[in-house]
Image (cartoon, rainbow, N blue to C red):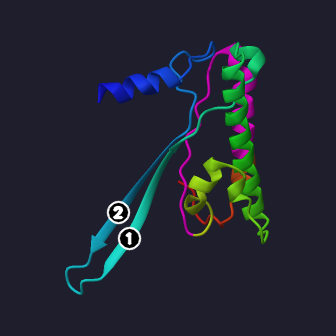
């Protein structure tokens, strides 16, 4: 409904670096169920669609007060995600999923027999070279620390 759209727009702040950004993470979970018509067995699966907000430097975005607090929360959640991936790859007995709501919500999508496809948006503009490089380095580190062995790459 229109009232929900207005509420969403009111809670989403625009930034100098990206005027179209909602500055939030988005997680959509879809449960998929398949029934074998021959024997009646049921198989369940879950598809998680996750759109992570990008980390930003406050000095470049012009963020102040509430926007700065929001940016700090986003950056913290991304750091917590990195911590979880590192803990999984090191096969630690304790995985810090509960350190952040993002990692708690993504818990069943990380590790185990889950499969991950990641898109990283970078900018071709010279003035965004530092952020683009930082994004690519972060992804490279995450790929190094994937908890399951990859036999084939697509």
Q: Is residue 113 left or right of residue 31?
A: right
Residue plotted at (75% across, 43% down)? 79
Q: Which residue is tagged 1?
A: 44
User: At x 69% / y 57%, what residue is drawn?
Assistant: 98
Counting from the top left corner in percent of width and height, residue 131 is at 72, 26
Instruction: Look at the numbered disc 1 and give the secondary structure of its residue.
Output: strand
The x and y percentages for residue 54 are 64, 32
Residue with the most extreme left position: 37
Residue at screen point 57% across, 57% down: 153
Q: Residue 125 is drawn in which quadrant?
A: top right
Q: In the figure, 142 relative to 15: above or below?
A: below
State the residue in front, 114 or 71. Answer: 71
Residue 124 lies within the magenta run: yes
Near mark 2 (Cα within 10 A), the count class, few <14, some 14-19 or many ≥20, is few
Q: Which residue is mark 2?
A: 32
Q: Are marks 1 and 2 in contact (CB under 8 Å)?
A: yes
Q: Which residue is located at x 69 percent, y 16 percent?
A: 61
The magenta span reads 113-140
Vertical placement of 61 versus 103: above or below? above
User: Quadrant location of residue 149?
Assistant: bottom right
- Residue 142 visible to an observer of this rendering: yes
> Which image quadrant: the N terminus?
top left
Q: For mark 1, does the 10 Å Cα neighbourhood hold few (<14), some (14 to 19), or many (20 or more) residues?
A: few
Relative to 14, say whether 111 is above or below: below
Give SS at disc 2.
Answer: strand
Compute the Cα span from label 1 to label 2.
6 Å
């Amino acid at each position: 409904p229109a009232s929900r759209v207005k509420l969403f727009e009111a809670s989403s702040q625009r930034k100098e670096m990206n005027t179209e950004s909602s500055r939030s993470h988005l997680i959509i979970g879809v449960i998929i169920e398949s029934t074998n018509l021959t024997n009646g067995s049921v198989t369940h699966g879950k598809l998680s669609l996750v759109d992570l907000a990008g980390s930003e430097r406050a000095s470049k975005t012009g963020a102040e007060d509430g926007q700065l607090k929001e940016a700090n929360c986003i950056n913290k959640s991304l750091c917590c995600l990195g911590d979880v991936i590192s803990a999984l790859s090191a096969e630690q007995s304790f995985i810090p999923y509960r350190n952040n709501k993002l990692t708690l919500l993504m818990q069943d999508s990380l590790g185990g027999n889950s499969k991950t496809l990641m898109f990283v948006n970078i900018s071709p503009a010279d003035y965004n070279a530092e952020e683009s490089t930082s994004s690519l380095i972060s992804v490279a580190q995450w790929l190094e620390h994937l908890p399951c062995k990859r036999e084939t790459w697509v």
